[in-house]
Image: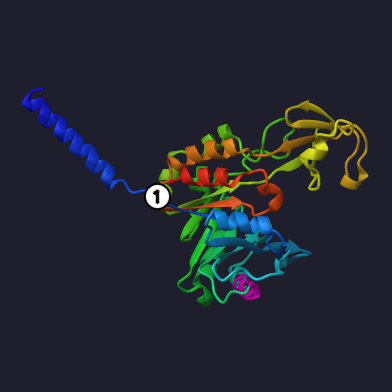
Amino acid sequence: MTKFNIRVYLVTALTLITLASCHKKRTVQTSFYFWKTVYNISSTEQQYFDTLHCKKMYVRMMDVDVVDGNTIPVSPVTFKTPLPDSVQIVPVVFVVNEVLKNRTHKQLDDLAGKIVYYVAGKIKQSGKTSFNELQIDCDWTQTTRDNYFYLLNCIKANNQLKNKYLSATLRLHQLKNQKGSGIPPVNRVMLMCYNMGNLRKYGSQNSILEQSELEKYIGHNLSKYPMPVDVGLPLFSWAVVFREKQYAGIAKRLNLALLSDNKLFHQNEPHLYTLQQNLPDYGLKRADEIRWETISGDQLQHAAQHIQKYLKSDTVNIIYFHLDEQSLKHYPYETLEETAALFR
């Protein structure tokens, strides 16, 4: 090897070492949503929370919806047990899109104050004296965008939220159509990487998460998003019911064990089942078709590998939806740890 070649080799090696030493791993924190109406953590749920070294929990406080013409809190959470002192609470409020339609600024001012007041009361019930972040969940549209963003600004300006973070959820269609959907006036967003397909469409597709659909929505548009982005991933399954090939709802009590009963169901395709007799206790009729939708650990990790390529934030929260023992039993700790580790 000539002196020139040796010099080139050394310069190249030093450059690679320098680049490697400058690379900083992303800080990743794992969290869970709690999306039930009664807060009472089981030992299994607590074990998952502790094993994954979670520091905070995203707790749905209530929905805000229109009932009989009035905007009211719906299905608020009650705390049967307090949150441990070591766990931070992130209150989450789901605002139904209908609430935002045809509202005056005065009405939205009033709603913002009521949301903050109600959340403060629920925080006390949880055993906490304070919180650092409030998250608003809303599937806003182009027609409700201005009112929604006005509401967010009103919430952010509230004295009780001084020096606190305000975050908002972000659907995939809102990420893709940034021009029409706009950028919410918050500190950071949580990208919901689930419920991306057409739930009501008859067929064998998975409306919770399909990689091909995910990749249609997420690319360099995520890299260019003008604020930090957290990621929500699904840990749930459901049975979608079709009657005469028309969407008939979700059978909440139906599970895979019952679907596997050959006397009750005939399996047509890997995830499609036809009911052989009436099941009145489940609200089902003979010939109803059930599409069982679930997400495997491999699917989670495949999705994570794609998403992480386009995240630019130095810190990211990976938030699993949701903390539920029946759902968690399908996902070993190692699977969830490995999925979160892909974002580092």
The chief SS type of the magenta part is helix
- For the question of whether residue 273 can be seen, the reply is yes
Closer to us: 90 or 110: 90
Query: Residue placed farthest to the top in the image?
Result: 1
What residue lies at 6% left-to-right and 27% top-to-bottom?
3
Q: Quadrant of residue 285?
A: top right
Rendered position, 196 above or below 274: below
Q: Which residue is mark 1?
A: 26
Rendered position, 90 above or below 238: below
Q: Position of residue 73 (x, y in %)?
A: 71, 67
Say what secondary structure mark 1 lies in.
loop
Q: Residues within 10 Å of mark 1 (few under 14, many from 20)?
A: some
The N terminus sits in image quarter: top left
- For the question of whether residue 96 can be seen, the reply is no
Q: Is residue 118 magenta?
A: yes
Closer to us: 117 or 107: 117
Left or right relative to 97: residue 314 = left
Closer to us: 146 or 276: 276
| Amino acid on which disc 1 is placed | Arg
Q: Position of residue 70 (x, y in %)?
A: 74, 67
Left or right relative to 258: residue 280 = right
Q: Quadrant of residue 118?
A: bottom right
Q: Position of residue 198 (x, y in %)?
A: 67, 38
Q: Is residue 322 magenta?
A: no
Q: What sort of colour scheme is used for the picture?
A: rainbow
Q: Quadrant of residue 244?
A: top right
**Span of residues in magenta:** 114-126
Q: Position of residue 298 (x, y in %)?
A: 57, 35
What residue lies at 60% left-to-right and 35% top-to-bottom?
210
